[in-house]
Image (cartoon, coloured by chain):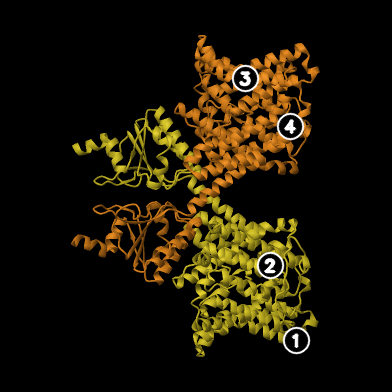
Chain colours: A yellow, B orange
Amino acid sequence: MLNHLRGYFPILDWGRSYDRNAFSNDMIAAVIVTIMLIPQSLAYALLAGLPPEAGIYASIAPIILYAVFGTSRALAVGPVAVVSLLTASAVGQVAEQGTAGYAVAALTLAFLSGGFLVLLGVLRLGFLANFLSHPVIAGFITASGILIAFSQLKHLLGITAHGHTLPQVIGSLWAHVGDINLLTVLIGGLATAFLFWVRKGLKPLLRRLGASPRIADVLTKAGPVAAVAVTTLSVWLFGLNDRGVSIVGEVPQGLPPLTLPGLSPDLVGQLLMPAILISIIGFVESVSVAQTLAAKKRQRIDPDQELIGLGAANIGAAFTGGYPVTGGFARSVVNYDAGAETPAAGAFTAVGLAIAAVALTPLVYYLPTATLAATIVVAVLSLVDFSILKKTWGYSRADFTAVAATIVLTLVMGVEVGVASGVGISILLHLYKTSRPHVAEIGLVPGTQHFRNIHRHEVQTDPAVLSLRVDESLYFVNARFLEDLVQSRVSEGSDIKDVILMFSAVNEVDFSALESLEAINQRLTELGIGLHLSEVKGPVMDRLQETHFLRDLNGRVFLSQYDAWKALAGSAVVPDVAE
Amino acid sequence: MLNHLRGYFPILDWGRSYDRNAFSNDMIAAVIVTIMLIPQSLAYALLAGLPPEAGIYASIAPIILYAVFGTSRALAVGPVAVVSLLTASAVGQVAEQGTAGYAVAALTLAFLSGGFLVLLGVLRLGFLANFLSHPVIAGFITASGILIAFSQLKHLLGITAHGHTLPQVIGSLWAHVGDINLLTVLIGGLATAFLFWVRKGLKPLLRRLGASPRIADVLTKAGPVAAVAVTTLSVWLFGLNDRGVSIVGEVPQGLPPLTLPGLSPDLVGQLLMPAILISIIGFVESVSVAQTLAAKKRQRIDPDQELIGLGAANIGAAFTGGYPVTGGFARSVVNYDAGAETPAAGAFTAVGLAIAAVALTPLVYYLPTATLAATIVVAVLSLVDFSILKKTWGYSRADFTAVAATIVLTLVMGVEVGVASGVGISILLHLYKTSRPHVAEIGLVPGTQHFRNIHRHEVQTDPAVLSLRVDESLYFVNARFLEDLVQSRVSEGSDIKDVILMFSAVNEVDFSALESLEAINQRLTELGIGLHLSEVKGPVMDRLQETHFLRDLNGRVFLSQYDAWKALAGSAVVPDVAE
């Protein structure tokens, strides 16, 4: 019973052995992550089109709920760039940014996404996430990074712009290019340059100056905090907000409020598909991070329980003024590197952020949005990586096509169309490949019991025996292909008396393929040709055993191709021996 | 050049060797098919919701165009039951039955369907038709047969009813049940009973009376003509049309008119998806028939050229007052059995129908629609066959699920939703199966070089070596599965020093799987465990050769599993020899 409960509440597992040492490690990690998360949370809320406090709220309850239900020991849950972009795109279609309806729709999106994740987890359908192939994810993340960077340009230039696709955003920026505010450009440009330098140049500098790797790391991560502090002070001291520099302004002081997602059928209908998409993309990102970190310590995560953990986190976000969240790469790695041992580190981070929400929000009144935009741009540009195009081009044209289509369609048609097309194209290309399987005509390698492709090797053949090795599972997509192939080979070779299908690589024969085999058997029988199988795998044979096909088969099923050859190709083997 | 032309105009192939003998055989077949087609064409037009002449017109130009472009020597093209139902369903959504807009929409549907088929043919995409698995087709045909039979009940009862799903049709029939016309019920009932008897009882009776099999066959096929003649005469003699019996009425006399499909963007947009669906279903039906008949004479059909032939036939239907057509099972078998040798038989049939259109249409003025409905009901009930449910249940639950869903959804949600769901479900279930591939932990069968599942056979193993045989191609849907599996096995067995993946049944490794293999290699390297591959197929190896994975692999690639075992499992083999 307790074991069963532990399955659903992993906290019961690690909580029992929690000690002072783990506590102090978790505390240190929590402090570091909290410092990093404050500007990041404000920035991602901006990206999602929500008021800044939504980003902080989305990091408190979700973290605690994930600590209770999640299985990863290092995953840090909260707003992330790609999901924030997806939220902006989905919610932007049902409500105007800045309205109460917009915030409510974001809660609904988190609620639906959480509900869908929990449902998948309870039904143990985590495998659905695998439909997003690695290249499609890589292409999608790269294209999203570009879209996000362009969408932030308006904040760096101090103008207004809209749109959820690259042509829309660029067109909108161009239309307002006359409104550029030079002070904003200056702040945004300096912040961006500074943050890039922190990322690339600060750590080596600190190391040269004699800082320990740990200290250098922490200071590097605190870069955004420094940018926030300096630009906020500058705005306040010089009153730049009166000279056209847009600032964050009033942020309510207090703990996350209790909120209710809107559940009108209309709203739910419009947000359901985006919620499913956000769930799956968020889950994939989260699981890859969790798996990478768990593997380093020979730990295991349970993907189906992860669904429940993330689902609970999103439902939590829906009721506490947040928006969709997931396990983020950057924050999780920082958490892990800072020494977090258990999900308690996450809970301590939540406490840190709650303190910030209560006490520190007045400090960000003069924070320029350009600084937040700069932190986003610098963070997402590190996600942009076109090398996947080159890598897939060299390895497989099908994978290349899927990536290229995902990138282009995401940029031109938007995130939802882009990722959905990527998945669709990957599946179609896979099915296309299996629809024309490799089938080798094989012969005996002299002096062995091995059979090889007659076009690649010097082998013995017999014009009366056609041996075909089928290199694919047989199922509806390729069933007719085999029918055609056998018929075409048989109509070419008029001496053929027997056909042997070697099934060593056939992992499945579905009902359509079974009927095709029956059709092949029937046609060959009408032509007076024998049909035989060899090397049929156990699980495949178990199924065939009780079918008409096997009862009606005009030939035999041989354990090995060599047995089949010995029994059927006498005419070819004997002369060889006689000579 | 001529050979190339022959590819696109198969008529150039068989036309050159056409002789008097083939001519007389083709003529006899044409006469028999023409007699059968006249009532059938009228009936299917009724089913499609079109005026009766549309059925005749749809059998003239399309047959001739198929004779020029098609590759099957016996296929007879024209209106068929399922495509007529699909036409009624699609066109009924954009226009009111009986209006000019309805007929124009039917032409548009034929035009779009023809264009799509030609496009697929030119792009050689005939394999797309394979996405309809045999069980899904069987389920769809069965459900369509039931839907068609119910949709004809209104004609047999003399009432009006509408709807494209079973609940709609039954509800509508029930609402009008008070309007039943008893004379119509009498005619319809007698005609139905007679036609069933012709189908089941007439042929044995004729044979007992001493008729040759050929004559018995022809007379049986002429059954519908007899029903048409007798009921038409009865209506005329007794003036039943004045007593509420609905009749065919005026049918224009003359050759097919030149018509133009409507091509407004609105209409095209609404009919494009149904047209694609009709194309694919029609193509699948047609190709199965053509293939079955061709196989009997060791002939070949070219599926991609068939697309062009059917496409041309449909475009022809669009410009000559017809509606979507395809190769029909019943008419093709009759054509074949009657001795047709070349597509010229089809052309002669077209001439026969053209004569009927010019000369015979006044004769069907008094033909009761109840008789046509009876011929439809009797024809489609022979399509209804629930045995597919039992057969798939015994063989594969996945196939059963796909059939059951197709049947239920076709009946309840309509033909389009039904067949689309069937395809979607088949693909998802296939992907689901491959997402959790069979992976066997294997050991050496003592005294051999064979390796078998440790849970099924008595085999030698070595706690330091984990050998896994992967029974599936590795691609994005199952890439993470293998990652999880290896990680979980390794975290269970702490003595493991080497992992061997046996790839004998791995027919493909896509880019996602390659990255998973890289991840597995990296994690095992961190744990100090070696990763090795064995029995990698040629085409898979060709691709891996140039990848980082193979360069970074911490272990080796062995030609055979036995080689790998000899090299790595010394500790287990040596004691065996020593004892």
Q: As drawn, which residue projects farthest toward the front?
A: A1
Q: Which residue is mark 1?
A: A236
Q: CA distance from mark 2 to mark 1?
A: 34 Å
Q: CA distance from mark 1 to mark 3?
A: 94 Å
Determine the secondary structure under disc 1: helix
Q: Does residue A107 appear left or right of residue A215 in this picture?
A: right
Q: Is residue B268 visible?
A: yes
Q: Amino acid at mark 2?
A: Ala
Q: As drawn, which residue projects farthest toward the bottom?
A: A210
Q: Residues within 10 Å of mark 1 (few under 14, many from 20)?
A: some
In x, y percent, where is residue A239? 78, 86
Q: Does residue A540 appear left or right of residue B91 in this picture?
A: left
Kindly identify which numbered label has been placed on residue A145. none
Q: CA distance from mark 2 to mark 3?
A: 65 Å
Kindly identify which numbered label has been placed on residue B173. 4
Q: Amino acid at mark 3?
A: Leu
